[in-house]
Amino acid sequence: MAEADAEANVILNHDEGQPAQDVEMAQAKPGEPFEVEVLGTAPRSAETAKDDGDAVNAEDRRSPPRIAFVDYLRSPIVTLCVGSGSGKTSLTAHKALLEHSPWFQDQCASFDPSNPAPIVLEDEQVTTVGSFLEYLYTGEYFPKKLLNSRALEPDPSVPSEDDDGAQLLKHARLYTLADKFGVTELKELAHSKIHRVNSTARGEIAYARYVYGNTSPEDAKIRKPVAVFWAHRSHLLRHEAEREFREMCLEYPQFGFDVLSLVLDARETGKDRELSGDRSSKKEPGSGRKRLRTLA
């Protein structure tokens, strides 16, 4: 018969290399090709291919597994030699935690595994490095910021008003240390605490001297608020620390120039009232007779 002799052409509608699946043949007239539909397989649209590609990419972007804190504690112990002379002290910390700092990563990379040498920090203060290590282990350092408040948690070992700048310098030194070690989050935290310390004019001068003596001229984040603070308050506070203010201007001419520039800029733009000593302006609640050190 013609039907029996006719060669049947079969069109398979499935991807090459896919496992065989049930098929369903449609009736066809003699001489016409059969069309075979593979059940359970749909043509891959552009959208389907894109979704599959996105899934692969998401798999590639998968975050690394979380490291348990105990794994940090299993890492080797590193010795830090801090300070010099009679104040030299040895501190220890776990290598895996120290390596959160790019600076310490480089230091640890040069270790001889069989005989690791201590890391020398002779220009740093023990208390500052101690606060740095406290942050690495806990994510904070004392005194902590209080929730819903612009204050820090109370420290009974220091006066409520910082008259010599010690409280300001605690955070300023940690700011510069975090900058050196490349720990940005700690740098931001220390900077935020500076503005929560209530201090006197003498304390502010001690802080200003440290900032201008230990930070880059390009670091406007910490330098400009110092200049703005004194530009807005110098006519009131310099009499409380006139000798220290004059010495500061002579020791760091850039400080005097920055303050004077802000005063003149304010007068030029019509902000005379703000800098004229008008005491009707509102003070920050709980801030004594000053601040905050906000950018102009």
Image (cartoon, rainbow, N blue to C red):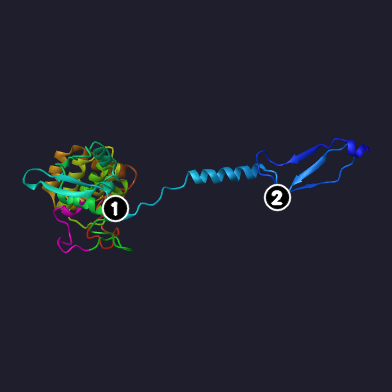
Observer-nearest of 121 and 22: 22
| Residue 176 falls left or right of residue 248 | right
- For this view, does 83 lie left or right of residue 186? left
Residue 135: give x, y in percent of width and height: 26, 53
Residue at (15, 61) in percent of width and height: 159
The region drawn magenta spans 154-170
Q: Nearer the viewer, residue 139 or 277?
A: 139
Of the numbered discs 1 and 2, the one sitting upstream in the chain is 2
Which residue is disc 1 drawn over? Answer: 192
Residue 188 x, y percent position in the rendering: 30, 49
Query: Does the image show residue 53?
Result: yes
In magenta stretch: residue 155: yes
SS type, badge 1:
helix
Q: Is residue 150 left or right of residue 14?
A: left
Inspect the image, locate mark 1, and give the three-letter code of the amino acid beneath it.
Answer: Ser
SS at mark 2? loop
Mark 2 = which residue?
A: 40
Number of other residues with Cα within 10 Å of mark 1, as a class: few under 14, some 14 to 19, many 20 or more:
some
- Magenta segment: does it hold 96? no
Mark 2 Cα-neighbour bin, 10 Å: few <14, some 14–19, many ≥20:
few
155 lies above or below 230:
below
Amino acid at dot 2? Gly
In the rendered image, residue 142, in percent from the top left (x then y), is placed at 23, 58
Determine the residue positioned at 40% across, 50% down: 65
Counting from the top left corner in percent of width and height, residue 30 is at 90, 39
Predominant SS of the magenta segment: loop
The quarter of the picture where residue 37 lies is top right
